[in-house]
Image (cartoon, rainbow, N blue to C red):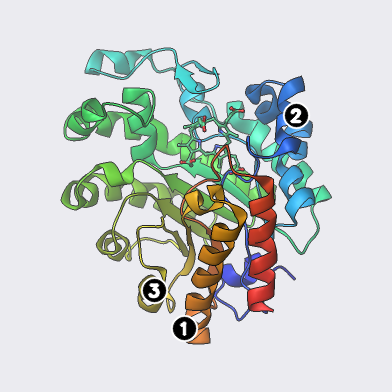
Amino acid sequence: MSLFVDALQRKNTQRPPLWLMRQAGRYHSHYQDLRKEHSFEELCKRPQLATKATLGPIQGFDFDAAILFSDILFPLEAMGMGLRYDPHPQLRWRLRETADLKKFTKPKALELEFQALAIQKIRTKLSQEKGLIGFVGAPLTLFYYAVCGSHRGDLEPARERVENGLYHSFCQLLLPLLTQNMAAQAKAGADVIAIFDTCAGDLPLEMLTYYGIPPLRDLLAGFRQLCPQFPVLYYSKGTTVAYYEALRSLSIQAYGIDWNINLSEFLEKFHQTHAVQGNIDPRWLLEDKHLCKQRLEKFFTTIKSLPPSYREGWICGLGHGVLPKTPEENVKLLVELQRKSFN
Ligand code: CP3
C-alpha cells in the first residue's frame, strides 16, 4: 500500500520512497505563508495547523512520506525548561550543575498530547499510499540542548558533563517521558518513530559508545514494552559506520545517515538487517539547476548500479534537513529525477 512502509520492512518496492527531513520549512512558500499568520509554536501546538504544515510539502512535492510538524525540544519544555523560538530555540535556563536538577518539574506526557492529536488528524487526511513519521530527539542530543541551549558554538560544557552524574540524572528524568511520547505518537497513527541524534557526532566514538548507547538502549527497551513490534528509525549526524555497527544489538529497524558516509558501502553492510535512509548532501540543492541535476543523476546512477537487493530497504532522502535557502525548483527536480531514475 505504501512505498515507505514497504521499504521500512525491506520489501522489494517498485521505487525507493522519498521524503526529506525539514521538508516543511522555510524554503517552502507554503510554510512561509503559514508563518506570516502564526508563530512556530502555534503551528506545532494547534493540531489543525500542525496538520496543515505537515501536509504542505506532500501537496507541493508529492513526497512519499509526511513527517509530523513539531520539534524535538518540546519534552524539555514539558520538564520545565521554558522554551520559545526567536526564531532559534531558546530555553529559559541551562542545565549546568547538580543543583539545577531541582528546577525540573515532574514531566507530564499529557503536555505533549498535541503531537498525538496532530498525528490522528494528519492520518485522516493523508492518503494511505503515504507514510507518516513521528519523532523524538535522542537523549544525548536533548542533553546537549539542555546544557548548551543549541548545537552551535562551544559544546565543551555538554561534552564535559556527559562524563559526570548530571547526564545520568537528566536521562532518568527524561526517559519515561520520551518513552511515553514515542508510544503516544505510534498509537495515534504514525508508521515509524524517528529518533534524531543530531549531536551524536560531537563525541568521539568511544565516548559515544560508552555514554550515548546506554540511554538509547533503555529508551528502546521501554518503548518495546509498550509497542513491541513498532518500527524505529535512528538518525545521527557526524558519526561513522563503526558507530552504527555498535548499535546493532539495539532494537532499531532503520538507520538514517549523513552525507559523509558512503551509501553504497553502508547498504552493502546493512541491507540484510536494516532499512537505510539518506544521504544526499543538502548543499547540492543550493547549486544552480544544472549542477544540481548533474550531482543527483550521478548519485542515482551509483545506487542503481548496486545489486537490487541492496536497495530494497533504501529510503531516499538527504543526509540532514533541507536548508532554508533551497530553491523549490531544485526540490521539484530531485523528486522528478528520483522518479525517472527508478521507474
Ligand atoms: O519537516 C520536518 O522535518 C518536520 C519538522 C521538524 C522541525 N524540527 C521543525 C522546525 C523536525 C523533524 C525538527 C527536529 C529538530 N528540531 C531537530 C533534529 C533534526 C535536525 O534538524 O537536526 C533539532 C536539532 C531541532 C531543534 C531546532 N528546532 C533547531 C536547531 C531549530 C532552528 C532551526 C533553524 O534552521 O533555524 C528549530 C526550529 C525549527 N524546527 C524550525 C522548523 C521548521 C524553524 C522555525 C522557523 O524559523 O519558522
Helix, strand or loop at label 3? It is helix
- Against 19, residue 47 (above or below) is above
- Can the viewer see residue 104? yes
Residue bearing the label numbered 1: 306
Helix, strand or loop at label 2? It is helix
**Distance (Cα) linking label 2 and label 3:** 40 Å
Q: Sort mark 3 into few (<14), some (14-19) or many (20+) by Cα contacts within 10 Å.
A: some
Q: Residue at x 26, y 34 (%)?
A: 168
Residue bearing the label numbered 3: 270
100 left or right of 52 in image: left
Helix, strand or loop at label 1? It is loop
Q: Nearer the viewer, mark 1 or mark 3?
A: 1
Residue 83 drawn at (x, y percent):
51, 18
Among numbered discs 1 and 3, the one appearing first in the sequence: 3
> In the rendered structure, which amino acid carries the disc numbered 3?
Phe
189 left or right of 70 in image: right
Q: Residue at x 69, y 79 (%)?
A: 343
Q: Which mark is residue 34?
A: 2
**Distance (Cα) linking label 1 and label 3:** 14 Å
- Can the viewer see residue 230? no
